Image (spheres, rainbow, N blue to C red):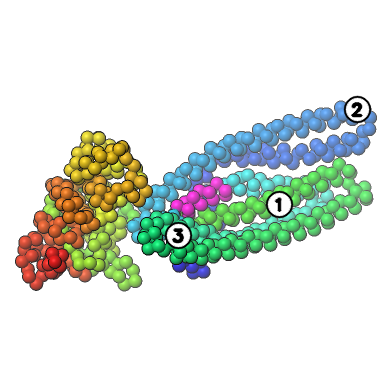
Amino acid sequence: MWNTEKNNYKISVARVLAFMSQYRKETKRQMIIILLSRLATIVFFLIIPLYYGKIIDTISVETTQWTVALVLPILRAILWRNLCNQVARRTIWWVIVKMEVSMMKKIYHNSFNYLHSHSYRFFTNNFAGSLLKKINKLVRGYESITDTIIFNLGAKSIMVVLMVVFIMREHLVLGLVLWWWTVMFLTIQYRAYKHQMKFDQVRYEYDSFVTGFLADTISNNYTISCFWSQPYESQQFGSILEKRWKLTTKSWINKEYIFTINSILMVWLEFVFVWLMIRLVNDWVFSVWLFAAFQTYVLSLFHQLTFIANDLKRFFASVGEAWEMIEILETPLEVEDKSDAELSITWWAVSVKNIAFDYGEGWRLFDGFSLEIKPGEKIALVWPSGSWKSSIVKLLMRFLDVQWGTISIDGQDISAVSQVSLRSAISIVPQEPLLFHRSLKDNIAYGRPDATMNEIREAARMARCDVFISALDEGYETLVWERWIKLSWWERQRVAIARAILEDKKILILDEATSSLDSESEKMIQDAVHELIQNKTAIVIAHRLSTIKEMDRIIVMQDGKIVEQWSHETLLNMRNGLYHKLWKIQAE
């Protein structure tokens, strides 16, 4: 069970802002327009209370019938400034919508690319549902942080400063009182919400875990139903939710404490400030209109500071949300291209020299393992159960990098060429046929999207799947539904073989491609495989020995080392050999 107490939550606000700023660099023009428009709205906002103060002053002095005429020019000025203010606001919204949508799309795309650049091991250690939620949190966090900084924190901070400066200019003591209180208030807010952020981060991490757990149970619904383990899974999920809501409750209660402190500070300031202004009016230091203007500014200041407090809460919450995915984006890739060099295929020879791979915790594979495969040679790799069958495929495809030794193709170290060029030269038919939730046509043509329909049909015919596809109501346009529940295992395997046939690459890996088939289906797929491996260098990883009798060379391994390597007939005649023993066990 995942434990939040074991995680170290050190969130760097500066690093989150640095990540956001790399996207803002591409939008300098839009940012300048937004800044100028925002300054215009601030100026209009601060000027208008002065006009209302003049109206009050005029009304209190002028009691003749010409009062309306005197006030009318002031009202016109207010009207025009309000209209200009609205134009500036609409300009900001129009520009920021265009900018944010573009940047959010780019963040999604960059996150997608970087996420899929991680190694195989990264995905085995993370819930798919959790990763998806983290990407969504990052995009949502970018939007929230950008809005908060542009619309709220920056603009409202300028308003607060200008209002305090105006009051200070008119009366130094009142201005200093207000300035001291404002600094104290904002300092408390900043420290309180920064402290609150670590509680939110624990909650967000656990929220991602809840999503991952839920996605895992949904994708394994069939297993849950078979074992009728729903009560157990429900109990587990209930325990996770209990922890999740305890964290949420604690976070929300902390925020209520902050709100309470804010309210007390504002009530205290309002009382002191109004009392001081009344004293000044009584002493004839203030005019009535200045009292009204000051009161308007103070009330507006309260609103702005309340908004700033809420914005700080939202800002730090958004930083906490975005941080999860930014950590992943800052995590170095386990397998990286050392250069842009392209793999050049001429002879299709594969060479493995003295390789070793360490999974960590003392688990080392293929310690000093070597293997030479000639161009066009068909070899089979045979292990007893539990001898790391899948690991050799991951190393050949560079899903993982060897720590010692080299793997080369036609004399070129695969770690020195781009992963794209390497994998473009190799076809693989995996033990578990993986299909997308797309049409059968799209799945077959996945390695060659530009293939014609005739080529797709020919590949399907060679893979012995054209008959069952043609019998479907929508034929090749039939959608393969989630987790392929409408196709049997052998049908999916034939589609995977058709995909490899259509790719027609010169190096082919078959990773136990017939291990889960009945005898009739196996015979059909064997025929398809024999057509597939013609004129190719083929590496067949097999558990069922009946499928590899025709290979040029069968390599028998144990504990990561080669113990036998001959043809099927030669190995079968070695009565004390491991291959003969495995064959006898399977035959019986």
Query: Cα distance, mark 2 to mark 3?
Result: 75 Å
Residue drawn at x 23%, y 48% is 494
Give the residue type at disc 3: Phe
Image position, residue 545 (x, y; %): 15, 60
- In the rendered image, is residue 117 in sight? yes
252, 119: nearer the viewer: 252
Regarding mark 3 in the picture, which secondary structure is present there?
Answer: helix
Image position, residue 33 (x, y; %): 59, 37
In the rendering, which numbered label is found on residue 66? 2
The stretch of residues the image draws in magenta is 131-145
Residue drawn at x 32%, y 40% is 478
Image position, residue 529 (x, y; %): 17, 49
Q: Quadrant of the N terminus?
A: bottom left
Q: Nearer the viewer, mark 1 or mark 3?
A: 3
Give the residue type at disc 2: Trp
Q: Main secondary structure of the magenta part?
A: helix
Q: Residues within 10 Å of mark 2 (few under 14, many from 20)?
A: few
Q: Are marks 1 and 2 in contact (CB under 8 Å)?
A: no
Regarding mark 2 in the picture, which secondary structure is present there?
Answer: loop
Give the residue type at disc 1: Leu
Residue named by callout 3: 213
Image position, residue 62 (x, y; %): 92, 33
Q: Nearer the viewer, mark 2 or mark 3?
A: 3
Q: Residues within 10 Å of mark 3 (few under 14, many from 20)?
A: some
Residue drawn at x 47%, y 56% is 211
Q: Of callouts 2 and 3, which one flags the residue occurring earlier in the amino acid sequence? A: 2
Regarding mark 1 in the picture, which secondary structure is present there?
Answer: helix
In the rendering, which numbered label is found on residue 305? 1
Task: State left or right for residue 543 relative to residue 214.
Answer: left
Q: Of callouts 1 and 3, which one flags the residue occurring earlier in the amino acid sequence? A: 3
Query: Cα distance, mark 1 to mark 2?
Result: 40 Å
Q: Is residue 327 above or below residue 496?
A: below
